[in-house]
Amino acid sequence: MKRMMHSMGLALMAVIPSFIAVSVALAHEPTAHVHGRATLEVAVEGGSVQISLDSPLDSLLGFEHAPRNEKERQSVREMSRKLHQSDRVFVFTPQSQCRLDSVLLESSVIEPGLLAADSDSNARKDHDKRPVNSVDTHSELSVTWHFQCAVPESLQEIKVQLFQQFPALKRIDAAVVGPKGQSRARLSPKSNQLKW
Amino acid sequence: MRPLLFLAFASAWNRRTTLGLMAISIALSVMLLLGVEQLRTQARESFSQSISGTDLVVGARTSPIQLMLYAVFRLGNATHNIRWSSYQNLSQHPSVSWSIPISLGDSHRGFAVIGTTTDYFEYFRYSDRRLLAFSSGKPFADIFDAVVGADVAQQLGYQLGDSIILNHGAGGIGLSDHADKPFRVSGILKRTGLSVDRSVHISLEAIEAIHLDWQGGAPMPGLSIPAEYVRKFDLVPKEITAIFIGLKSRAGVFQMQRYINQYKTEPLLAALPGVALDELWSIVSIVEKSLLAISVLVVGVGLSGLVAVVLAGLGERRRELAVLRSVGAGPGVVFMLLAIEGLMVVVVGSLMGLLGLMVLSVFATPILEIHLGISLATWTLSAESWQLLLTVMVTGFLMSLIPGYRAYRISLADGLTPRL
């Protein structure tokens, strides 16, 4: 009996990785990947504002692979630092008193340590870690910001300043779900305001 | 001022044919301009209102715009259907508040037949979260019950309890119908101004039932299952066309969208209706803008024509102006006279155009509703339209100052004895 349990356990262990592989493959379905273009999803409900950015790494970083030398690692840290400084990236209606709750940066080719808020200290620890996925194809960065607003009623618009921070970014297709329903906006360096 | 107005009117009345024709040409150009503007704004409104209460529309994987067009506005056709099991799974997802399955494909004398569940009457919301209401009757309870929209009932003269026969496919000559399984009108919906008015709603089981003895899109020869026996069959639908979903939290819509778009067992597409519509408008905006530009040009042509006619008429009116001068009218009065005349023609032309547009839209509304599902509000004008109308009048007035100035110059130079 015990032996049978053991062999079943082995069989299960053999099967599990294939499940994981399937779910990973599905999670990264091929989506449109155009350098210079990013998508932004803005959801406003009550006092909480969630903003998700999906962008080709190239538009934010200039390359799309795991950093190979100290210089590239430095640019990753630089990018991560810019994205963590949310008040430089998004400007809310001042009266709404929105404050940053959390930021999460994710990419399939860059180790999470480099993308964390205090990347300088973490980076050394993770230095020898194998990158998550080192295949040299197109890859993306997704960022999720959470904000809490004290006076959500007065939140009328969000100015998106990603263009100033990342000049390679030329266009952002934004979808907004807000108090007045769903809408879509195409942002560019010249028109960078989301209104509802 | 009063005698001046009278004088201007009397003088214009003397030349009523030419000026009347000018007013008509201005009326036509104003009609075109306002018509384009009305169509543009009302089409948008009508489209966005019909789906304003729905968070997600789910269908087979295609473009979000196409999904919206066929599932919500019944324009164009579905590329694929989706499995019933997908609907069942999605409707039980914890963040889903309500979900309405939709099955399209059949018709009734040109009106779309929608297979759905009673959830449709309970949850479907339009223009600022209004629910569908019955003007008489109730939702379908029996398999062969049908709920008809306000337009269907009105145009075909249906009452509660009437028997109706559905057509297979889009209907028309050569296409078979479901004459062996008549439906009974169990409810009539109140008018909404949306495509719902032009639809016949039956249950999903009824859609299965009327196609039981069909195969490959035609009735099977030699096999006919009478209506009274269909209840013995398994009438659970196998596939549907689309699902409307309302979420518990509006903000969770992106997460749900991602979940559906990466649905494992079947390729599905979840579209945010508001976003998809905005996308559609951004595509058609170039057409709208060029239409608007053309109609602005036509108005320009109309107003220039007015100026040309009044200017050309000045030659003939030298004697008239000289007489006015002789009885004591100064050059300023002459100038005012011409300006008033221009303004009069422009205002009369614009009002005629407005009236013409309203009369035209009374006739055009049913046609637009049938073909595009757009309902026009006939007697209301958007703020932008009023603005356009005002701009036309002001521009017309300013342009009629040109002949006024010319008349002023002439009357100064000619004095009392014009050389004709």
Image: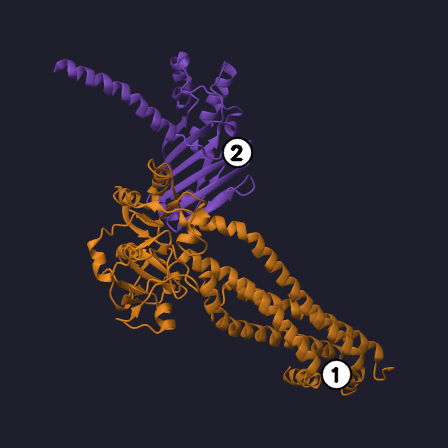
In three-dimensional space, the C-alpha distance between marks 2 and 1, rounded to whole angstroms, equals: 73 Å
- The nearer-to-camera label among 2 and 1 is 2
Horizontal arrangement in the rendering, residue A15 relative to residue A97 (left or right): left
Chain ID for label 2?
A
The reply to whether residue B393 is in sight is no
Q: Is residue B266 above or below residue B177?
A: above
Using the image, tell me which numbered label, if any, was put on residue B329. Answer: 1
Element on which disc 2 rests: loop
Q: Is residue A124 above or below residue B319?
A: above
In the rendered image, residue B99, in percent from the top left (x then y), is placed at 29, 49
| Point 60% across, 65% down: residue | B391
Dot 2 corresponds to which residue?
A34
Quadrant (top left, top right, bottom left, bottom right) of the N terminus of chain A = top left
In the rendered image, residue A81, in percent from the top left (x then y), is placed at 45, 25
Give the farthest residue toward the top: A128
| Point 46% across, 54% down: residue | B76
* Amino acid on which disc 1 is placed: Ala
Q: What hue does chain B carry in this figure?
A: orange
| Same-subunit check for callouts 2 and 1 | no
Q: What hue does chain A carry in this figure?
A: purple
Element on which disc 1 rests: loop
Residue sitting nearer the eye, B226 or B164: B226
Q: Is residue B37 above or below residue B23?
A: above
* Amino acid on which disc 2 is placed: Val
